[in-house]
Amino acid sequence: MLAAPALEAQPLTFQELLVDAGASGDDKATADLDGDGDADGVIAGAALSWYRSNGAARTFSGPYLIRNSIQEFTTDMEAADLDADGDIDLVVSDGNGTNNVRWYENPSIGPPPGGTADPTIGTNWEQHLIGTHGSWAHDIEVGSLDGVAGLEVVTLGNGAFKIHFQDAGVSWTTVDFDQHATDGSPAIADLDGDADRDLFVQGGWIESPPSGRRVAANWVFHPITASDPGDGPAASAVDVDRDGRIDLVTCPQHVEGALAWFKNPASPTQADWTRTVIDPSAGSHHLRVADFDGDDRPDLLLGLELAAGYITVFRNTGATPAFTAHPVASGGGGHNAAVGDLDGNGLPDVWAADWIGNPPLRAYFNAPDLLFRDGFETGSTSRWSAAQP
């Protein structure tokens, strides 16, 4: 399959906003929680809270507390419509005890009994049990894995790997995949083109079986040579070269090391996926993928924690492909940085803070107010003024 021609890349600049000088937390996410068309920001650590985006104004209201933690929300969070009612819910893990994987139901569509649809009121967010991870959940992913309606929740970390399969009525069956329970960031994607979802895991991928997907032993492991950079790899599933097959990108999660992508071959069960190093000294607790510069190529967002880290976009700039590092912010603040269109201008922005106890919380808005392409303007025209003769 031939790659589609790329659009012309736009200049990449970021406007930094201090959102909350006292906020920090392991978990970050962006999602349109209030249904107004732009993404809001979510953070969780000692508490789970969200900040309402004011769109083109590039400001936020809040924080709006959803829940205080029982122990600590860590170390990852996902935003998804778990109950398929049309609004976005939140998936988190609280501590390392039993029943520590939970989801919070957005009240915007279908408020709780005795409550209202107002998502700024924390008690309107109903808490629901998913299951027990078995320890501290280090990474969470959400996606359809068993071929039936509903989303599954994958939790990984600290010696445990669970897939929580969704049953009717948003109840859950937890299956132990602990044979793959090494720290890392799993990624869900159809890797072999058979229309079901597989999972990247440390050192390779596990293939979804044609049936019996709720039996861990039915999932076959396929190694990918040199794909484990150590330190619990961050993994992302993305068609890097736009050839129609899902590739793998990995880097270390907590230290600097090789950021590399692995080309999905014609036969993905073979181990020797072609490895290309993007940067020999990079790292990120999670890898985020978005088209930051509007050229229809997938770019990568990396962020490490604390002062030794950075927040950097690696721009996919060529058909080869080739990548160019573009700093978003120097210093710390990049632990689990999230991506979303926070100001509604059609371009992905960055939502970032360090892990619990290390404030502040910042937003990095992508691009000036206006972009031009082929003579047509896109973005907000609210700051235009009429020229005087």
Image (cartoon, grey):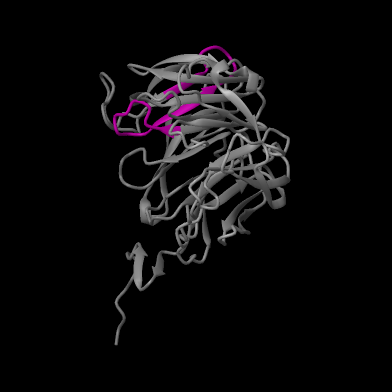
Residue 309 in sight: no
Numbered range of the magenta stretch:
79-103
Most distant residue in the front direction: 267
Residue 156 in sight: yes
In the rendered image, residue 203, in percent from the top left (x then y), is placed at 67, 32
Q: Is residue 91 magenta?
A: yes
In the rendered image, residue 343, in percent from the top left (x then y), is placed at 40, 53
Total numbered badges shown on the rendered structure:
0
In the rendered image, residue 263, in percent from the top left (x then y), is placed at 60, 46
Q: Quadrant of residue 313?
A: bottom right
Residue at image coords 64%, 19%:
179
Of residues 161 and 128, the one drawn nearer to the viewer in this rendering? 161
Of residues 212 and 299, the one drawn nearer to the viewer in this rendering? 212
Of residues 113 and 268, the one drawn nearer to the viewer in this rendering? 268
Query: Is 383 displayed left or right of 347 in the figure?
Result: left
Residue at image coords 58%, 39%:
267
